[in-house]
Image (cartoon, helix red, strand yellow):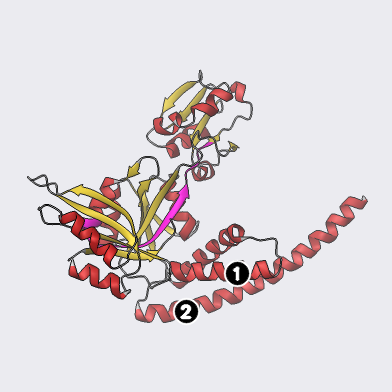
Amino acid sequence: MSELEKKLLVLRKKIDEIDNEILTLLNKRMEIVKEVGELKNNTNAPIYRPEREKEIIQRLTNLSKQQNGVLGEDEIKAIFLEIFAISRSLERKERIAFLGPEGTFTHQAAESRFGANARYLSLLNIEAVFKSVANKESKYGVVPIENNTEGVVGITLDSLKKYGVKIVAEICMEIHHSFASMQDDLKKIKRIYSHPQAYNQCLGFLETHGLLDVEFIPTESTAKAAELAKNDENSGAICSKIAAKLYNVPLLFEKIEDNKSNRTRFIIISDFKTQKSGNDKTSVIAKTSHKTGALFELLKKFKDKNINLLKIESRPNKDDTFNTWFYIDFEGHIDDEKVKELIESENMIWLGSYLRDC
């Protein structure tokens, strides 16, 4: 055995010993989690508490800084979000509906909060996700609500108005397209599968690697692209990272999109009110009378109460008029007195108050 191998053996033994300690502590944690689950099940309290999870991650990040630890907030978040997800599954098994198919960015957003082992229900349109939650077929739903380059998702806003479910969390996720293939030699790739939108967002990468003249085969989703590339040795797929993982197609390049600042905001919907975190966002639906200055008067009430507006979007009534209603995001929580007073005085429809993540 060489000197290097001897040193590696010593280090690996230390790692094994630490892993044993981690496992022992995780088992202790999960035993306590099961007790928490029993208490929550007796009162039917929600098991998803994003404000509590944020508090834990922040506390551990501060502790790591005090210890001059290697782990920063991103690393701690990645580790503990999975621990939280497993903890929730031990407390209570609940179904999470999402805009499918499997392998989409919405699936990736859902898995980032609920973990790889959750009970997922893939649905083919956004309204179906809302119906699943409203009918209590699923406890949670995950759908996109806006993209920083494409704008809001109209059907999501309309469904929030229609189905009476609540926003309990938001997820801001960077959208990265990846290039996956069973073939590690780009010169041997004869076909590229992808959704046309994803393909057009990666033209710079394709040009750089001499792939613009390769046959492009459009698919209904990037997840389908990964599935097809799995069974076609001389092909590649432009897809999400989770789709490549799902179909076990090796990633050759992880971030190939032309616009590196592409982000999508997703919301998690359910049937309960979240608790205050101190950094909250509230979403409402508001209507105004059809007279001069009505919208100005509504917005002035936000200013008078010193409530910071974050977003306002108009949506059509979809009746025989051209009247509209407004979707509004602003800082604060429904349990804040000034927020509660404003919502009640204007007869707004409250859509949820939740930890601000975007």
- Residue at 41% across, 56% down: 120
- Residue 19, position in %: x, y? 70, 66
Please indicate, yes or no, whether residue 136 appears anywhere in the rendered image. Answer: no
Q: Amino acid at mark 2?
A: Val
Q: CA distance from mark 2 to mark 1?
A: 21 Å
Q: Which residues are magenta?
A: 160-178
Assess disc 2: are there few (<14), some (14-19) or many (≥20) residues with their C-alpha within 10 Å of its C-alpha: some
Q: Is residue 168 above or below residue 232?
A: below
Estimate the x, y position of residue 307 in percent, counting from the top left.
32, 65
Q: What x and y, as percent, mark residue 237?
A: 50, 32
Question: Percent from the top left, x then y, of residue 271?
Answer: 30, 67
Name the mark on residue 333: none
Q: Earlier in the sequence, mark 2 or mark 1?
A: 2
The image's mark for residue 36 is: 2
C-beta proximity under 8 Å, tags 2 and 1: no
Closer to us: 280 or 215? 280
Q: Secondary structure at mark 1?
A: helix
Q: Which mark is residue 60?
A: 1
Residue at 57% x, 39% y: name it.
Answer: 254
Q: Please name the residue shown 15% across and 54% down the image.
A: 293
Is residue 45 visible from the viewing direction of this image? Answer: yes
